Image: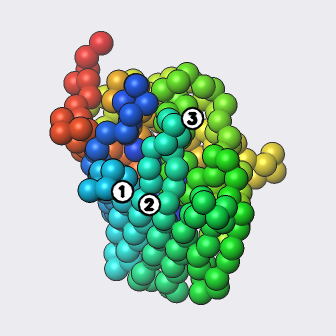
């Protein structure tokens, strides 16, 4: 289930080059090197009736399921999280996290692993899915190094990323010219995370590769997607 735990932190969403959010749905296939296993996940962004947005993630492998949902708004060209809900059920012990962002009172309240918590808000604070939108917006703006303050469980952590180059990624729906990004970790960390975002499709995530501390390698690749009502289609394999 490790790949399902990674997906919510790393999967991308969609936005226009004008920095406006647009609805989307994307599905991904997952595999683990040396282990014959199949899994899949879906990720979506949709507007709500009151002008906010709902960002949802669902993943499954064998009898285990993971779901994650954030409600957010776009305010002064900033992503502002309002609520966050994470739930894992199936193999092993389940886990649930809820977070409520009260920007007027300046606190984040919630429950993590059965224990209540309260944290102070700070400018630009994000949750474990909304920072992904901020990452893509920064890539669209041409940034090379990105840092985000994120409510992770019941604490606030710092996530860092940097652009390392460009590559052409092959998926089931064609090839994509993509920006390659890596998660910046401590020098002694053996864990490696690399992500590829399609430049011509609102920086939608098309591939993710994770190497764990034990050497196990995980990968997810785009299966299909719809962006603002249009099917996402890559360059035909073999084309220049």
- Choose top left, top right, bottom left or bottom right for residue 103: bottom right
Classify 59 as above or below 169: below
Write the residue at 63% across / 52% down.
125
Question: Quick one: 202 or 213, which is closer to the camera?
Answer: 202
Classify 157 as above or below 87: above
x and y percent of residue 176 in the render? 35, 28
Q: Alpha-carbon distance for marks 1 and 3?
A: 25 Å
Mark 3, residue position: 181
Mark 1, residue position: 54
Write the residue at 18% across / 39% down.
229
- In this rendering, does residue 48 appear at all? yes
- In this rendering, does residue 212 appear at all? no
If you read the primary sequence from the N terminus, does the residue marked by circle 2 or circle 3 appear first?
2
Classify 48 as above or below 5: above
Which of the two marks, 2 or 3, is nearer to us in this view? 2
If you read the primary sequence from the N terminus, does the residue marked by circle 1 or circle 3 appear first?
1
Q: Are marks 2 and 3 in contact (CB under 8 Å)?
A: no
Mark 2, residue position: 70
Quarter of the picture holding the C terminus:
top left
If you read the primary sequence from the N terminus, does the residue marked by circle 2 or circle 1 appear first?
1
Q: Left or right: 110 with respect to 154?
A: left
């Amino acid at each position: 289930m490790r790949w399902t735990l990674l997906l919510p932190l790393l999967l991308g969403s969609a936005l226009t080059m004008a920095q406006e959010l647009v609805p989307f749905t994307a599905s991904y296939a997952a595999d683990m090197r040396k282990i014959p296993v199949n899994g899949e996940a879906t990720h979506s962004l949709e507007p709500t009736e009151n002008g906010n947005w709902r960002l949802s993630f669902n993943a499954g492998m064998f009898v285990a399921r993971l779901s994650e949902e954030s409600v957010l708004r776009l305010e002064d060209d900033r992503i502002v999280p309002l609520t966050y809900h994470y739930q894992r059920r199936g193999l092993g012990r389940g886990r649930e996290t809820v977070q409520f962002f009260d920007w007027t009172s300046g606190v984040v309240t919630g429950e993590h692993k059965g224990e209540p918590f309260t944290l102070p808000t700070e400018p630009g604070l994000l949750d474990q899915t909304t920072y992904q939108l901020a990452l893509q917006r920064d890539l669209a703006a041409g940034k090379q190094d990105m840092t985000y303050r994120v409510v992770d469980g019941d604490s606030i952590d710092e996530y860092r990323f940097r652009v390392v180059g460009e590559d052409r990624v092959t998926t089931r729906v064609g090839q994509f010219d993509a920006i390659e990004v890596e998660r910046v970790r401590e020098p002694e960390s053996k864990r490696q995370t690399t992500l590829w975002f399609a430049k011509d499709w609102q920086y939608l995530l098309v591939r993710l590769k994770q190497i764990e501390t034990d050497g196990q390698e995980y990968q997810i690749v785009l299966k299909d997607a719809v962006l603002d009502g249009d099917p996402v289609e890559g360059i035909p394999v073999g084309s220049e």
